Image (cartoon, rainbow, N blue to C red):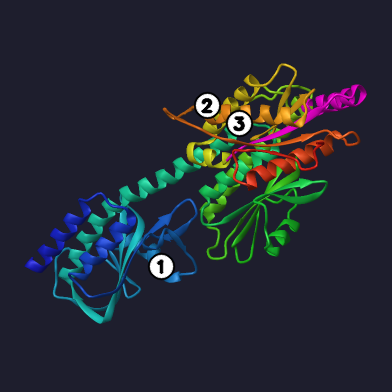
């Protein structure tokens, strides 16, 4: 073997001894090959048995569609050593003096004596190669096969771990949350992270119509056209050249919602579809449990996570206090509270840590109120408080006391502590208004507090002087 071939194998050995990502491997192999032979192009491809497709390692694992040459070569090479210019060959036992005019060379990637991929070399200008070159390429393919097996295994393991983590996280949501307006955004965010190449939309069926509940907007009419095609018997629907997938959420044979995956670039692969089917089924189970759990809890009085009044109990107490206030002529103030940047807490530390923040803030609120005050968890990261026998200025003092207490509270998260702040809106009951109108004004004041910088108390401008 000449020095050129030995240098080539030495460079290959140095490369394959490194800890490499798939991108680093393909770039390195291209450099090593080009030091030995002039190539027009180089490709690494693996066969995905789950989806019966060939994927390009040199192009972010994208699926190779409608390429008969590659699929045909993959079948031919299972029983041969090479496919040269679209024709399969076996190497003879010894090196001969045969030369080939060559434009393309494909070599098998072997795993446990089975072909699981291809190496493709495309040559410039009908290059001429001899048998010694082909024997060298067989050694090259064998060495690359071992390295690629490990990388593919690691990549697939990572995807599988992320998939099962997503499944478990979706299943765990119901342990502490049962409000759909809180659960669905969490599910949407988890799906969006896992199926990162496609936009995710979550619809729920309300009064016979699909309503978008996550994210806030979808302007693609093709998404809504896909929804119209769903039936209870539909497993999923692909439209727009397989770039839009509609996966129905079902319960007891009825469609209760739908998860849509949409891309403007790539088709949904068979693997994406398989993952989305499973994630959708888990999401449907979680959402259906939430509905059932919500029906059970509608007769309870306490929020399961914070141990404050739940929203239903808050509405009962609101009616009672409004009636008492109007009958006796006493003042009544309403307070709406929102944890600032709560989504960032969830995104940074996880939803379990978000629950710790909710419980801590609820505990601080309860600790700094009078026994006659009525704190409730209104939904998500919002709290509502009724302050009987309280005028606006007194309520402002209470609000500032709460705000300061929350800001100074250190919350233990992941072996460290963090601090959060709250924004607050206040309103005092006017003689002729309803409870809903009172809290609508408090909510507007809360919005003003958040828009003007957060971590502050704002009083509704229409409150009584």
Q: Label 3's element?
A: helix
Q: Which quadrant of the figure has residue 182?
A: top right
Decide: is 73 above or below 192.
below
Residue 235 image offset from top left, x and y in percent: 66, 50
| First in residue order: circle 3 vs circle 1 | 1
Please report contact status of discs 1 and 2: CB closer than 8 Å, yes or no: no
Q: Is residue 376 magenta?
A: no
Residue that numbered label 3 is attached to:
403
Question: How many numbered badges does the structure rendering display?
Answer: 3
Q: Nearer the viewer, residue 174 or 111?
A: 174
Residue 127 is at least partly visible in this image: yes
Give the class, few, some or many, for how many residues have Cα within 10 Å of label 3's Cα (few <14, many ≥20): many
| Residue 329, percent from left and from top | 89, 24
Mark 3 and mark 2 lie on one chain; the one further toward the N terminus is 3
* Pointers 3 and 2 in contact (C-beta within 8 Å): no
Instruction: Name the residue beneath numbered marker 1.
Output: 70
Query: Where does the N terminus fall, quadrant-wise?
Result: bottom left
Q: CA distance from mark 1 to mark 2?
A: 62 Å
Residue placed most toward the observer, 166 or 41: 166
Residue contact at pointers 3 and 1, CB within 8 angstroms: no
Please provide the residue range marked out in magenta. 313-340
For label 2, the SS is loop
Q: In the image, is residue 155 above or below residue 174?
A: below
* Residue at the farthest front position: 465
Which mark is in front, 1 or 2?
2
Per the model, the C-alpha gap separating discs 3 and 1 is: 65 Å
Residue at which label 2 appears: 409
Relative vertical location of residue 14 with respect to residue 357 in this rendering, above or below: below
């Amino acid at each position: 073997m000449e020095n050129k071939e030995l240098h080539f194998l030495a460079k290959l050995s140095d490369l394959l001894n490194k800890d490499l990502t798939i991108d680093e491997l393909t770039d390195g192999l291209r450099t090593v090959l080009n030091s030995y032979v002039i190539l027009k192009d180089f490709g690494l491809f693996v066969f995905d048995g789950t989806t019966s497709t060939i994927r390009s390692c040199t192009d972010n694992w994208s699926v190779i569609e409608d390429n008969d040459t590659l699929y045909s070569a993959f079948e031919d090479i299972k029983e041969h050593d090479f496919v040269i210019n679209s024709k399969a060959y076996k190497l003879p036992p010894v090196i001969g003096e045969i030369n080939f005019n060559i434009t393309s060379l494909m070599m098998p990637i072997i795993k446990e004596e089975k072909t699981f991929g291809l190496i493709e070399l495309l040559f410039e200008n009908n290059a001429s190669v001899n048998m010694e070159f082909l024997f060298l390429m067989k050694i090259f393919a064998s060495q690359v096969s071992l390295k690629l097996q490990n990388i593919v295994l690691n990549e697939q393991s990572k995807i599988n771990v992320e998939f099962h983590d997503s499944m478990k996280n979706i299943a765990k949501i119901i342990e502490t949350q049962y409000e759909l307006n809180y659960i669905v955004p969490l599910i949407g965010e988890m799906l969006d992270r896992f199926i990162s190449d496609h936009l995710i939309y979550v619809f729920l069926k309300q009064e016979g119509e699909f309503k978008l509940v996550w994210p806030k907007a979808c302007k693609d009419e093709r998404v809504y056209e896909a929804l119209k095609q769903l039936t209870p018997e539909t497993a999923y629907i692909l439209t727009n050249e397989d770039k839009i997938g509609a996966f129905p959420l079902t319960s007891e044979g009825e469609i209760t919602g739908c998860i849509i995956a949409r891309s403007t670039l790539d088709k949904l692969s068979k693997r994406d579809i398989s993952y989305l089917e499973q994630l959708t089924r888990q999401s449907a189970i979680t959402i259906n449990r939430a509905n059932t759990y919500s029906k059970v809890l509608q007769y309870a009085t306490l929020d399961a996570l914070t141990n404050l009044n739940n929203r239903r109990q808050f509405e009962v107490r609101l009616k009672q206090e409004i009636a008492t206030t109007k009958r006796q002529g006493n003042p009544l103030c309403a307070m709406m509270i929102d944890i600032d940047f709560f989504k960032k807490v969830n995104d940074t530390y996880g939803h379990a840590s978000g629950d710790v923040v909710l419980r801590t803030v609820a505990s601080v609120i309860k600790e700094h109120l009078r026994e006659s005050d009525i704190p409730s968890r209104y939904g998500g990261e919002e709290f509502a408080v009724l302050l009987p026998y309280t005028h606006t200025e007194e309520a402002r003092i209470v609000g500032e006391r709460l705000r300061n207490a929350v800001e100074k509270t250190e919350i233990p998260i992941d072996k460290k502590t963090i601090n959060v702040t709250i924004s607050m809106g206040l309103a005092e009951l006017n003689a002729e208004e309803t409870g809903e109108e009172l809290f609508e004004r408090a909510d507007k004041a809360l919005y003003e507090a958040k828009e003007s910088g957060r971590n502050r108390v704002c009083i509704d401008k229409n409150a009584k002087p």
